Image: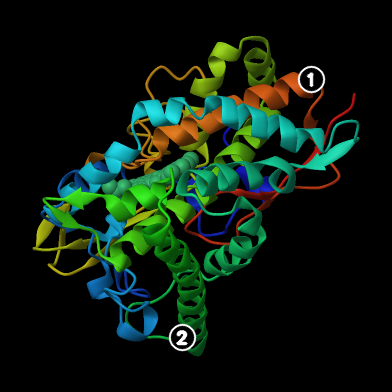
Amino acid sequence: MTTIAENWGVHKDQFWLRGEFPAEPVGFEAETGAWNVYGHAESLKTLSDPKVFSSDTARLIPKEMSPEKDQFTEGNLLQMDPPDHKKLRTLVSHAFTPKVVADLEPRIAALTNELLDAVDGADSMELVTHLAYPLPVIVIAELLGIPASDRDLFKEWVDTLLRNSQKRSLIEQTEADRKAAEETREQVTNLVNYLGEHVDDRRKNPREDLLTKLVEAEVDGVKLTQNEVVNFANVLLLAGHITTTMLLGNTVLCLDSHPDEYRRVREDRSLLPSAIEESLRFLSPFALVARATTTEVELGGRTIPADSMLFTWVAAANRDPRTFTDPGIFDPSRAHNPHLAFGRGIHFCIGAPLARLEGKTALNILLDRFPDLRTDPAVPPSFIPSPHMTGVNELQLLLKP
Ligand code: HEM
């Protein structure tokens, strides 16, 4: 068996999910004006050398295509390079200690049970609506200190962002590109205005929450600006839920479509963490990360000029046959799984421990409560309609024998 992903309606550009791998691990795409990195070793190089592969990619995006630089990028860890990156990351790491994350376990378990109570006794459920979306968004909203009851509001904004996250040329913009950029700007503005009001409130009324910690935090004796607090909170809100929603849906789909593995994991829950890691490799939620070269550089046998946009396709690297034996096989017992789904190096996902904990806790409860859980063969899964993500958007499940 190679891959069954082609039957799932995944995005047509994600060729690695069809068991294909390019002969060249690095290539230039004339249509978009960007370089694509697909190989695992080459991806690692781009993630491990921020001096050459900078995260400040906004400078290479045509002005009419990008949300206002500074207004939206200040404080966005994902777009920062050393030394500023280190200062903010150190500060934020104080709020995301292993203890803070571990202490969330009972709350994650209680929320999962509460969400599943709503489908108790039902014959079927749609996983994303009932569990995979609300759980991570409530957890991150509660951590930040914003009302989780506003989640339908952010869902509307975030769905538009995801829909507009499409392949775009850096060379020539179409009317559709300009419209998408405008809509993206609008939705990011909605998000930062919303968060800005909560940040203003926390300056006057401090609470025991992450927004208050960010408002009060100091880096080298200097406090974060309003833009920095708001943009960082925005990254946490977005990164903190979209990807974990995908992780939960993808893992259920991977298990369901591999019955022997599913049975083994069900019977021996100690296998669940490695099944989650394998799901992250097999269907990587964030398919790519972007970098900008600061100097001319050799990579994968190609010479990349300075100031080039580079897309490191971690989802493809996670299927590189030079690194992974039988990459198209979902194998939770894989002995060596150096997947890049959470990135690597200085930008390694700060929320990885939280995502792993949410995955393990929620899936354990789901399997306990619904021993006959399986996908509904009459309703095929659907995926987020963006080449930049690999994640279940809808997954209909049958709950009874
Ligand atoms: C960074 C993936 C969950 C917050 C990253 C990066 C990846 C990633 C690939 C590296 C980006 C780069 O190198 O440019 C994922 C996946 C997740 C997940 C697949 C779930 C399955 C979370 C959660 C949070 C979070 C739950 C917050 C609570 C962040 C932040 C960064 C980041 C703040 C930026 C770190 C930095 O630049 O130093 N994530 N993430 N992520 N992630 Fe996650």
The residue type indicated by label 1 comes to Pro
Residue position marked by numbered label 2 in the rendering: 178
Binning the other alpha carbons within 10 Å of mark 1 as few (below 14), some (14 to 19) or many (20 upward) gives few
Binning the other alpha carbons within 10 Å of mark 2 as few (below 14), some (14 to 19) or many (20 upward) gives some
Which quadrant of the figure contains the N terminus? top right
Q: Secondary structure at mark 2?
A: helix
| In front of the other: 4 or 163 | 163
Q: Is residue 376 left or right of residue 108?
A: right
- Label whose residue precedes the other's in the sequence (1 or 2): 2
| In front of the other: 142 or 29 | 142
The mark total stands at 2
Q: Residue at x 82, y 47 (%)?
A: 379
Q: Residue at x 50, y 54 (%)?
A: 389
Label 2 beta carbon less than 8 Å to ligand 1? no
Which quadrant of the figure contains the C terminus? top right
The picture places residue 259, in percent across and down from the top left corner, at: 70, 22
Q: Secondary structure at mark 1?
A: loop
The picture places residue 384, in percent across and down from the top left corner, at: 60, 57
The residue type indicated by label 2 comes to Arg
Q: Is residue 145 left or right of residue 363?
A: left
Q: Is residue 259 left or right of residue 357?
A: right
Q: In the image as oriented, which residue stretches furthest toward the top? A: 268
Q: Residue at x 29, y 63 (%)?
A: 228
Q: Is residue 264 above or below residue 382?
A: above
Q: CA distance from mark 1 to mark 2?
A: 48 Å
The picture places residue 16, in percent across and down from the top left corner, at: 48, 47
Q: Is residue 246 above or below residue 266?
A: below
The picture places residue 103, in percent across and down from the top left corner, at: 47, 26
Residue position marked by numbered label 1 in the rendering: 371
Q: Is residue 54 above or below residue 161?
A: above
* Residue 200 seen in this snapshot: yes
